[in-house]
Structure formats: C-alpha cells, structure tokens
Amino acid sequence: MNVPTASQKRLVIVGATGMVGGYALRYSLERATVGSVTAIVRRKLGISHPKLQEVLHRDFADCSSLSQVLSGQDAAVFCLGAYTGAVSDAELRRITVDYTIEFARVLHGSSPNAAFSFLSGSGADPTGRSRIPFARYKGEAENALLAAGFPSVYLFRPAYIYPVEPRKEPNFSYRLLRAIYPAFQLLFPNQVIRADDLARAMVDVSIQGTERGGRVLENRDIRAMVKRIRPSTE
C-alpha cells in the first residue's frame, strides 16, 4: 500500500460494495490528492490497488476492533445503508442509526480531526416527527453525527439517485424512475442526481475540508457542487 505524502489525504470509505460507495471508491483511487483509501466492507471488493487497504468487518454493531485501522484518517465517506422494504423496520433502524453511531464513535476516538460525509436522504427529519421511518432514522443519525465531535460533518440528502450503470432495481418505484429518468430529470432536475456525481461530491467535500461545523447538502446543493467541479455534467 502507498504511503501518503504530506499533501495527500487518508480517506476511509464505508459501504464501498454499494452503488454510491463503489463510485466513491473508484474516484478516490484515481484522485491524486488522496494518498490512501481504507475500505471497511462486509464482503470482499474483488479489486486491488496500491492505494487501497481492504478491511473485512461483518458486525457494525461493534466497531471497536477497527480502532487501529481508523487511526490517522483525514476523512470518512459513510455510504452504508438499506432500502426501505428490503429489510424489517427494526433492521432498517439498526443499519441507519445504530451502525452509523457506532462507527462514528470509534472513528472519532481514533481520528478526532477527521471530516465526515454521510449519505443521508431527501426528507431526512431531525425532529423525529415524520411518519416515514426512513426520514426519522436518517434524521436521528444526522443528529448523532452533529453531536459526535467531528470538526466537519457533511450531511448529503440526495433525492432520486440515478444508478448510471444497469443493475437489478430494488423495487418497482426504482424500476419506474429508471425507465422515465430522461423525462424526469428534464422536468424535475433538482429531484435527481447521478450516483457517480454524488460520490464525487461526497469525496471532494470531505477531503477539501473547506468548512467547519455541520452542513446539510440538499439535492439542489449537490447538483450545484457537481457543476462547479464538472460543468459538462448532463
């Protein structure tokens, strides 16, 4: 594995086997300002790269064993999650809230100055009053991250994430949105974001560290950020 230079960043990615996390991983490995990438995964990635350290960790309910590999990190991109309906309500909360809080606890103990980019979702409700479990749980996770003590926390709230590459869609709604995407993104541009663009934004903001404190990035904000990075998008 490469040893980062003084000007390069050490980045940890959680959820690199998922759609957005996978793009974040690929982009990070290509980015010159990223010197090392630690991917915390529950199953093997199946790739190798001089910058990449793959760490298998199956139980995110307890991340204590990760304290050493999380030491000295400059930033984290957290994309671990589950689709509504794909798991039980209890499991959805466990993955969305408990796993996030536990990972953040260990990361902050090992790298207290790291920036944290979190894949939340449009409609996330930090007040806890929403009737939609996904919104309540994402809001609860956001609140916990803002209180965790990191100098910079970026809460990404994308709307519909366009997969870009063909995949097996998780439910009918996603199959429908993919089918009508060309028209949907023309009519409602601020309600869609490409998965690769979202991943780029999450990586870039976490390693640049331009703002301290917490920042909520709605879909419109993410698209604006992407256009500054790559004006030719869409």
Image: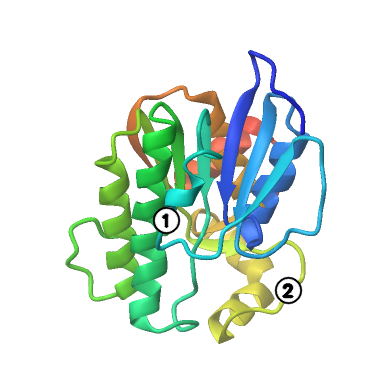
Of the residues shown, which amino acid type is indicated by label 2? Arg
Question: Which of disc 2 and disc 1 is earlier in sequence?
Answer: 1
Of the residues shown, which amino acid type is indicated by label 1? Ser
| Displayed quadrant of residue 37 | top right
- Identify residue for label 2: 167
- Identify residue for label 1: 120
Crowd rating for badge 2 (residues with CA inside 10 Å; few <14, some 14–19, many 20+): few
User: Is residue 125 at all visible to an observer of this figure?
Assistant: yes
Q: Is residue 58 left or right of residue 115?
A: right
Q: Which of 113 and 127 lies nearest the eye of the viewer?
A: 113
Query: Regarding mark 2 in the picture, which secondary structure is present there?
Result: loop
Q: Which of 169 and 33 lies nearest the eye of the viewer?
A: 33
Inter-mark Cα distance, 1 to 2: 21 Å
Crowd rating for badge 1 (residues with CA inside 10 Å; few <14, some 14–19, many 20+): many
Residue appearing at x 36%, y 54% in the figure: 102
Q: Is 35 drawn above or below residue 232 in the view shown?
A: above
Q: Is residue 173 left or right of residue 200?
A: left
Residue 191: horizontal and vertical position, in percent?
49, 59
